[in-house]
Image: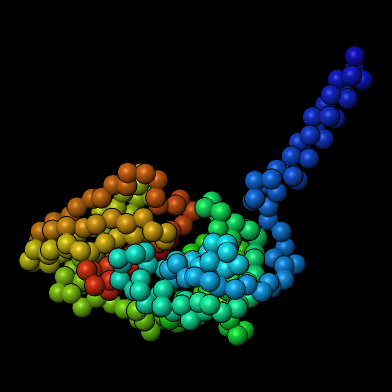
Amino acid sequence: MKIKRLLVFLLVILILVLLSVYYPKLTGNYISNSQNYQKESCFVSRVIDGDTLICNNQSTRLLGINTPEKKMPYYDEAKDFLKQIENKSVEILRDKEDVDKYDRKLRYVFYENRLLNSEILQEGLATSFMLEGLRYEDKFWVAESYAKDNEIKLWEKSNDECTNCIELLELNYTDEFFIIKNSCDFDCSLEGWSVKDDANHIFRLDILDSSESKGYKSKTNIWNDDGDRFFMRDETGKLVVFYEY
């Protein structure tokens, strides 16, 4: 009886070990050493937007960046930046993840030995996204910092009269809400203004009376507990408030 129990116990351990090895591969979440991957040639038949293209007839998402969504400021400029490789051959390189939840390939894109993921960050037409552990993480941080320090495009500061008195009082990522305040001695119409997180969850703002504080609660889980960003922009897309934790 003891031997039988021991055998059952060992069998359970073996199953758990096998699951730990093969389950991530089956689900597409397998993390490997990115240094082992090699560049592949790829023909770009169509550019969808600033961070997505069709390459060898497969939807491909540029790693480490987010560009504006349709109808948002700088959407067209980001898309035009990527259109330089439309109907051309490029090289692509994967990292620790192969595809995202939409079954798009996640890749670095190289054109004439230029890393376009990094270049579009430096041009201020994208912001960094989920960089931790990526092969070119440091390069992306440097590129984004350049755009931020020089206030290029998405990092350009707003000159609206309300900019200097609209402030973020609190961002509560546990209870999913944020509070902003108008410290001006006049009312501010924030129609057309927006707030977004590190991804593309967007809040639309409205009128904020003089000295008024107003809270906005998320309908779903948006603000990540382990770190996120807060972008507030005016109606032209210029930056009013930037906060990260």
**Which residue occupies the extreme left position in the image?**
186
Q: Quadrant of residue 201?
A: bottom left
The answer to whether 5 is drawn above or below residue 66 in the figure is: above
**Which residue occupies the extreme right position in the image?**
3
Where does residue 52 sit, x and y in percent of width and height? 49, 66
Where does residue 144 sit, x and y in percent of width and height? 46, 76
The chosen color scheme is rainbow
Q: Name the one closer to the observer, 45 or 222.
A: 45
Where does residue 242 sit, x and y in percent of width and height? 34, 67
Q: Name the one closer to the observer, 51 or 65.
A: 51
| Residue drawn at (42%, 59%) of the image | 199
Q: Quadrant of residue 15?
A: top right
Q: Is residue 69 left or right of residue 42?
A: left
The answer to whether 183 is drawn above or below residue 102 in the figure is: below
| Residue drawn at (24%, 72%) of the image | 236
Query: Count the marks: how many?
Result: 0
Quadrant in the picture for the N terminus: top right
| Residue drawn at (26%, 62%) of the image | 194
Can the viewer see residue 103 in this picture? Answer: yes
Q: Is residue 134 left or right of residue 227?
A: right
Q: Name the one closer to the observer, 9 or 112.
A: 112
Quadrant in the picture for the C terminus: bottom left
Where does residue 73 sit, x and y in percent of width and height? 30, 71
Q: Is residue 122 left or right of residue 92?
A: left
**Which residue occupies the extreme top position in the image?**
1
The answer to whether 33 is drawn above or below residue 12 in the figure is: below
The answer to whether 223 is drawn above or below residue 41 in the figure is: above
Q: Is residue 154 left or right of residue 139?
A: left
Can the viewer see residue 116 in this picture? Answer: no
